[in-house]
Image (tube, helix red, strand yellow):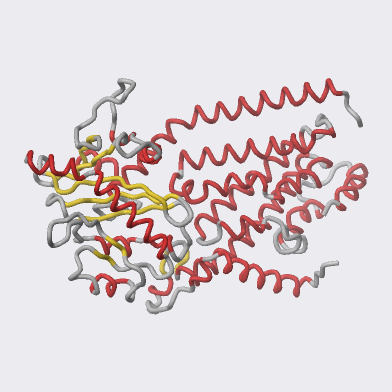
Amino acid sequence: MSTETIEQKAEETVIATEPLLSKRRKKFVTDPLNDDNPVTVQVLGICSALAVTVKIEPTLIMSIAVVFVIVFSNLIISMIRNFVPNRVRIIVQLAVIATLVTLVSELLKAYNYPMYKVLGAFVGLIITNCIVMGRLEAFAMGNKPYDSVLDGLGSGMGYAWVILTVAFFRELLGSGSVFDFKVFEAIGLANFPNNSLMVDSIGAFMVLGILIWIQRSRTGYVEH
Amino acid sequence: MQQSNAYIIRFTLIMTIVVGGVLALANQALRPAQLKSIEYDTKSQILSAVMEINKESDVLNMYSQRIRSVVVDIQGNEVTTNEKGETVVAEKVDVARNYKKDYKERLYPVFMYMNESNPDQIDAFILPVYGSGLWDKIWGFVAVDKDFESIAGVSFGHKAETPGLGARIGDKSIQQRYIGKKMFDANGNFVSIVMLKGESGGGQASIDAFTDRPNEVDGLSGATLTARGVNDMMKKYLDYYQKYFSKMKNGS
């Protein structure tokens, strides 16, 4: 994924003024959603994709937190990229990510304590989410702030839709509900058995595996 | 571009100050809201031992109307100040931290659930309990009826029990199995309430199967070790409060 950095740098010097959402910039957002998805194609961020996807509500909060952290850390790193000493750049990136993650965690503790109790440890683990640091190192260190924000948005959304899909199937089949709304009881199938496997991490592996299969067979991506 | 060491040191210093400043500021600014959230959470946990709490419940109001709290020691005597001379507030007693001390030196909060029409009459005593499950800590609140032996309700929480197995102790349907159980056997000996191994059907079937066994509740299939942790926690903590109960019994 670091290959794109060099290409875009060359392009940037040529284009003097381009529209806010030019074709090139749209690609920053759309690429990670499908062709270059951080979870299904790059296989990053699997740890949290397993841990928080038992129910949709915490997954949604987690997605918002990750999008927030990626976008703002990309923005901040991109703004200070010319001042960051090369030898300590990883530490600087980590400091920025850790600060943002701590902020998110404190906000959650203040305004949504039940979710903080569910997600507490995993929000902290966004710091070690490889997607975030990967984007900083591969993109934000070499691109302008606006482009970096778009790139962060794309990667964050790419992560979000995958874990939300996983969470949808896990909650539906594991707990028989969607957003804690009992679906099967509502449609008169109160006896529909819950699949405990889906509540376990194994369920996440299975759903994720199927998702990767479908996605890769559609895009024709093969690992080299 | 290779920067000098002096530049790197200056950069990291400034970064540390900025980052530290931002975090300290955020922490200070959010502190009141966090304390409020934690208070709300504690109170809804206490109340959930005796009633159904959902998102619309007016927890704080309900709590101030229905709950009176005291702190007692292992002898059942009321404690009003700690060793530093500060006033002890039951809601602020950290059960987890007390758990690390010897049981004789711990503080034991009691939350009295008062009658709705007669606010001087106690309906139930809600006691915090704390212990170890299979993977990590478990805790909860046990409501003991005013007869000093029946369970009026329980609520359990856990940190890391297995989802779908041990984590079910957090489910209301499991907690309902404890309602009406007694902590003394037919001869009046303290036996606590024991969750057995194995499960007979779940749901209402599990409650029905145990109606004539006042000291036992149905188990959790696949979570025998978590159940053992719950049993241990219930037995120890109910025992710690016995002196307080006998004092209350003689007093009233």
Depth check: give the residue in front, A168 or B165: B165
Task: Locate residue A220: give its quadrant.
Answer: bottom right
Using the image, determine if residue A76 lies above or below residue B156: above
Q: Which percent across, then down, holds residue B166?
A: 43, 62
Q: Which percent across, then down, holds residue B173?
A: 32, 65
Depth check: give the residue in front, A31 or A42: A42
Quadrant location of the N terminus of chain B in the rendered image: top right
A173 with respect to B185 (left or right): right
Residue displayed at 61% across by 28% down: B22
Quadrant location of the C terminus of chain B in the rendered image: top left
Task: Locate residue A141: give its quadrant.
Answer: top right
B241 with respect to B25 (left or right): left
Residue displayed at 72% across by 70% down: A215
Using the image, determine if residue A128 lies above or below residue A204: above
Residue displayed at 50% across by 57% down: A57
Q: Which percent across, then down, holds residue B17?
A: 67, 23
The tally of labels here is 0
Using the image, determine if residue B74 lies above or below residue A181: above
Depth check: give the residue in front, B128 or A113: B128
Q: Which percent across, then down, holds residue B251?
A: 7, 38
Task: Locate residue B108: give its quadrant.
Answer: top left
A64 with respect to B81 (left or right): right
